[in-house]
Image (cartoon, rainbow, N blue to C red):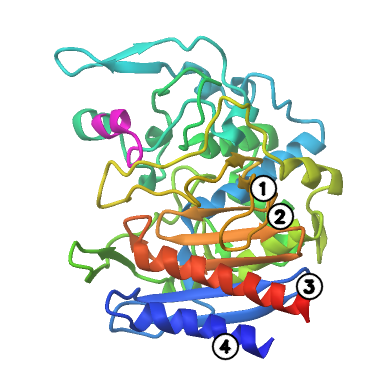
Amino acid sequence: MADLSSALDAVLKDVTTGPVRVPGVVAMITDREKNIWEGAAGDSRLGGAAMGLDSVFAIFSTTKAIAGTAALQCVEEGLLDLDAPAKNYAPAIGKLQVLEGFDADGQPRLRAPKSEITTRQLLLHTAGFGYDFFNENYRRMAEEHGQPSVVTCSRASIETPLLRDPGEVWEYGTNIDWAGQVVEGIRGKRLGEVCRERIFDRLGMEEIGFTRSAAMKARTVTMHARNADGSLTPLDDFALPDAPEVDCGGHGLYSTVGEYMKFIRMWLNDGAGPNGRVLKPETVAWAVRNGLESRHKVGTLPGVIPSLSNDAEFFPGLKKGWSYTFMTNEEQAPTGRPKGAIGWAGLANLFYWIDRQNGIGGYWATQILPFGDATSFTGYLNLESAVYSALQGAKAA
């Protein structure tokens, strides 16, 4: 255990002191019972206050699994039919059309979708939505037609055209924001209230929410931009909105890393939490399996807005799937992450994984744009690799 701690501490030191450093990072590793290692290194703001274990992050798309959990609870209670039209629960989604392209004058060409969107498609990212930083047509809609960025957490930012007909392809996008709207329609409450009552309180997760408390705001990490020469610029005015128009289930939460570890442990423990069960074991068992059809491919996310994302992909060349709602490893990864493990990431270079087979998981948090930052992502992969190296050593001993 001491050897593992030393190895993980060294990873954090390396990424925060190297020639192309990250400003600061918080990372934690947990088993089924508790955190077995916690680390914080570098600065909360470049040249400013030190990063702490209680630092607060905009966790972006690592929000998705939490909103997905709220949807799974609705399924368990018989309130949500995953294959019924999602508009039955969130009527506004039924009004959206498909963007076929642009005419000679640059105007969008729209038509009705060939079928209704289902909540299953939303959870699996096959409903037809995308992101403007990963899709050229959405980028044009943003730049030429005023489609708002999802970071505004506005209703207009999710009430966008579909890029493809429902069910046609896997495309990563605002699907889980809409799954959150489905949950709100079923529960008659804001998504944040639902998550507080049915997930956070049962897991003892306090400092997490779509709106920060004053104490959380005081400890929020500053966003940074990675410049072409590798240097960093603090983005002091960049923040997800508190009291947002929409509680965006796809990306809107703020949290400490320690609070998220409690959520990871729930998945390691078949849905059980310290203050009550969040999901049934049988729900967890099917929710972590790849739900995509063979024609749906999880591949490279193309960075079409360079300030927000590089081209990015976990484990290129290996088969990946998507579950409810995580990326699934369909083969063992080079880090040692086994087939059947789940995980994902957040735009500001936040990464996590959950390995139910070995009863271990971890989370890595930075606040750097664009996504796919070489230093942060490599540091995370080194962290995960160190965990599996130690695990193999322990098994061999």
Q: Are marks 2 and 1 in contact (CB under 8 Å)?
A: yes
Closer to the chain start, of discs 1 and 3, is: 3
Residue 158 sits above or below residue 362 on the image: above
Name the mark nearer the viewer: 2 or 1: 2
Name the mark nearer the viewer: 3 or 2: 3
Tell me if residue 16 is in the magenta stretch.
no
Please name the residue that numbered disc 3 is placed on. 33
Instruction: Tell me the residue at 47%/32% (across/down).
Output: 171
Please name the residue that numbered disc 4 is placed on. 6
Q: Residues within 10 Å of mark 1 (few under 14, many from 20)?
A: some
Write the start and end of the magenta stretch as one range.
132-140
Real-space Cα distance between discs 2 and 4? 34 Å
Q: Position of residue 55 (x, y in %)?
A: 48, 75
Query: Residue flagged by tag 2: what amino acid is it?
Result: Ile
Instruction: Tell me the residue at 62%/37% (across/down).
Output: 184
Instruction: Tell me the residue at 47%/12% (across/down).
Output: 113
Q: Position of residue 62 (x, y in %)?
A: 54, 54
Q: Quadrant of residue 274?
A: bottom right
Quadrant (top left/top right/bottom left/bottom right) for the N terminus? bottom right
Q: Residue furthest front?
A: 396
Q: Secondary structure at mark 4?
A: helix
Q: Residues within 10 Å of mark 4 (few under 14, many from 20)?
A: few
Please name the residue that numbered disc 1 is placed on. 194
Quick check: can you spot residue 213? no
Q: Quadrant of residue 75?
A: top right
Real-space Cα distance between discs 4 and 1? 40 Å
Name the mark nearer the viewer: 3 or 4: 4
Please name the residue that numbered disc 2 is placed on. 199
Query: Residue flagged by tag 3: what amino acid is it?
Result: Glu
Closer to the chain start, of discs 3 and 4, is: 4
Residue 77 sits above or below residue 224 on the image: above
Query: Residue flagged by tag 1: what amino acid is it?
Result: Val
